[in-house]
Image (cartoon, helix red, strand yellow):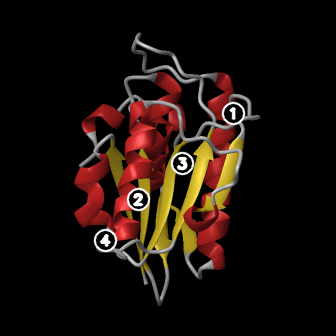
Amino acid sequence: MKILILGIGNILFGDEGIGAHLANYLDEKYDFVSQEHTVDIVDGGTLAQLLIPTITQYEYIILIDCVNTDDGKIGDVYFFDFEAVPENITWQGSAHEVEMLQTLQMIQLMDDLPPTKIVGVVPYVIGENSTFEMTDEVMKASVLMEDIIIKHLASLGVKSNIKKNCLLEDIAKLSYKRGI
């Protein structure tokens, strides 16, 4: 099975870049090994609909992004199936979140959406001012997000070998150089 880990986010708006940063971090830190599966990692930034050809090439998606909720607080982590979005997830955050939801819905309408798991965190939304800095809450949440992804890959039969010890903070400083 071809598995895609897809990080989504706007790195210019602090916490909203966590999906892109975490994807780049996982790519730098791990080798993913399986006899049956391949794992690719893509920093999709805010490309949304432009990612349709990429997404539809895969048989399984793990999407990393921000989510907004009716009752959550900054740093709360959610892991769910796109086919069973919890009722408290509102997707009413920044434009990239809404565009990604619409992109997944369009692919689903075309009957081309592979099984998709979402690993999301509630961000601090900064509004108009840009910053590369993420809040402490989201930085702490990234540890749980990483753990969820690694354990989920293991449940699919993918072993995660550490190839390089690194810190998310260091990788995030270079995310602007990566992406599609």
Q: For the residue marked with disc 3, what is the amino acid?
A: Asn
Q: What residue lies at 50% left-to-right and 37% top-to-bottom?
A: 18
Do the residues bearing badges 3 and 4 touch, measured as CB atoms within 8 Å? no
| Residue 135 image offset from top left, x and y in percent | 61, 22
Secondary structure, mark 1, is loop
Q: For the residue marked with disc 1, what is the amino acid?
A: Gly
Give how far apart the Cα atoms at labels 3 and 4 are: 32 Å
Crowding at dot 1, Cα within 10 Å, few <14 / some 14-19 / many 20+, comes out as: many
Q: For the residue marked with disc 4, what is the amino acid?
A: Thr
- Residue that label 3 marks: 165
- Sequence-earlier tag: 3 or 1: 1
- Residue that label 2 marks: 104
Q: Quadrant of residue 95?
A: top left
Do the residues bearing badges 2 and 1 touch, measured as CB atoms within 8 Å? no
- Sequence-earlier tag: 2 or 1: 1
Give how far apart the Cα atoms at labels 3 and 1 are: 24 Å
Give how far apart the Cα atoms at labels 2 and 1 are: 24 Å
